[in-house]
Image: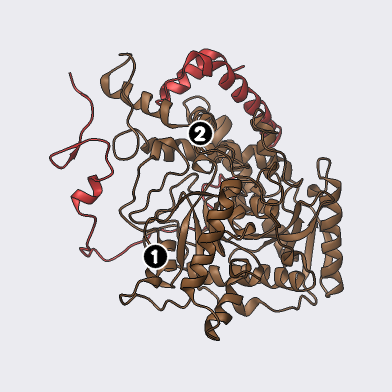
Chain colours: A red, B brown
Amino acid sequence: MLSKDDVRYIGSLARIHLEENELDDLTRNLADILHYIEKLKTLDVKDIQPTSHVLPIKNVYREDKVLPSLPQEQALATAPNQHKGFFKVPQVIE
Amino acid sequence: MKLNELTAHELLDLYKSKTTTPQTVYEEVCKAVNQLDSKVQAYLRLAKNKPQSLSPSSPTGDQKFPIPIAIKDNICIKNEEVTCASCILKGFHPPYDATVIERIKKAGGMIVGQANMDEFAFGSSTENSSSGATRNPWNLNCVPGGSSGGSAAAVAAHETIWALGSDTGGSIRQPAAFCGVVGLKPTYGRVSRYGLIAFASSLDQIGPLTKDVTDNALLLNIIAGYDERDSTCADVAVADYTKSLVKDVQGFKIGIPKEYFIAGLDREVKSAVEEAIAVLKKLGAEFKEVSLPHTEYAVATYYILATAEASSNLARFDGVQFGLRSTPAAVRRSPIVDMYEATRDAGFGQEAKRRIMLGTYSLSSGYYDAYYLRGQQVRTLIKRDFDEAFKEFDAIITPTAPTTAFKLGEKTDDPLAMYLSDIYTISANLAGIPAISLPCGFSQNGLPIGLQILGKPFDEQMLFRMAYSYEQSTSWHKRKVAF
């Protein structure tokens, strides 16, 4: 059974800070959905190859040609914060 | 008849005979949006930039299709705001066009605006939009379906002529059914996903929503085909789909999956689909029962795989490269992690959080084999069901959704009940096959009912042929919303 602590832990893995009042609902919802998903355990999947992709995909090669790409100013234009051509973020290293 | 109530092929005829002009049609559509959209709320915003095909300077491309079109808000349009109906992308202006947008612009398409959707396409009712719900034009107290609910409602309300949506588990077909329009999910790889903001990369596909089957074929002609910028876009020849608009299904074999006609299927939907089958039988199609034994596992499989892919795809929304950045209320872990967590808490709605959490859980250490790997294995079984069926049948026919449009708020507190409204559409995404939904009747209280036709990979021609044959034998597509 999924506990509130489990949900808090998943939240930290997913980088979502969850308020106390969100945790109860989420725990209940996720437990319901996981319970429904349990039905897959009744199937025998021994020796069944997993499908990650439906098409017979192969590696796509192309000529190594230099083509125009987005200019730096345009690529940065949508950033919440930028500095001298870089994305600016809060302090990462002590 | 008002111009905005016509189909694209009717308008193209009027252009040819010089009865009207693209400028007049565009203005009529914009007028309808101004009059109706405060009720329907199909659009999140109107395009800032006027259509190139109306500009006096020499346009590029052949401009053969100057038709108004609504674009779901998860498809990138250069220099327009694109948000996936999420707070986390507020203010995002993509610096490039998606491949489908490039092709539409080149063909002369006139972008009216961006259609509402469930946030990041997470939903089946368009209620999970950060800007509020879209209404069903046939009954404003009902949902339009989702996640491409804005696209479907805009077409049904004649606030556009064409629309693009995206379909990960039914997000084009289910709203098409609820709004009484034609919606196609092409074969996986038929249409480039370059510039489509990803939900579940192995399932997502862009497709057309239109007023009739002919328009649907016209629009697929424009957007389909190989694109080297999407490595999963298939290098498979594209037909001229208008050639498939033939009223002849003589001798074609159609399967009716017994697992789809089960408890939970609304009585009126069931009888409308049975009547549709009778119409096609009269036209010479042969019907037989078929079994798709793993049908009941599709929804569970989907909610493992789609959420796992979503949790990975949505990791990029972290307050660094685009959209929202929030300032954390307190120091908890480290300045940067606190910023990520605060941004994602403030930026994502409840359903987005649920799905990211579910996906993160099934991919996390200790649960991967039991959930994600097993989900992929069951996906193989579901795909095999269709491979087997298509050895014998040219197509499969089912209802698109188990019910007609439900009331606003009816399922918002019960995510699982919401998920189950996609029970008939999800399998096509898992198997990668094409499927179309078209109107096949109305309930007693006046809500549209959808018929779904599923086909072999890259055989959209068969779907158009069957859909067209049925449509031309009935008049459901001619019924119009009255406000």
Disc 2 marks which residue?
A: B352
Is label 2 in contact with label 1 (beta carbons under 8 Å)?
A: no
Which label number is shown at residue B206?
none
Left or right of B343, for residue B425: right
Give the numbered dot on residue B102.
Answer: 1
Q: On the picture, is B286 further left or further right than B80?
A: right
Helix, strand or loop under label 2:
helix
Residue extending farthest to the bottom is B17
Asked whether residue B175 appears in the rendered view, the answer is yes
The amino acid marked with disc number 2 is: Ala
Q: Which chain contains the residue that carries disc 1? A: B
Q: Please report, as a chain letter, where disc 2 is located.
A: B
Tell me: residue A52, above or below residue B77: above
For the question of whether residue B165 can be seen, the reply is no
Does residue B366 appear to the left or right of B437 in the view shown? left
Q: How many callouts does the rendering have?
A: 2
Which residue is nearer to you in this view: B343 or B416?
A: B343
Callout 1: SS: helix
| Amino acid, disc 1 | Glu
- Residue A32, x across and y down, in percent: 65, 25
| Residue B327 locus on image (x, y percent) | 31, 23
Q: Residue furthest left?
A: A84
* Residue B16 image point, x, y percent: 53, 84
User: Where is the C terminus of chain B found, in terms of image quarters?
Assistant: bottom right
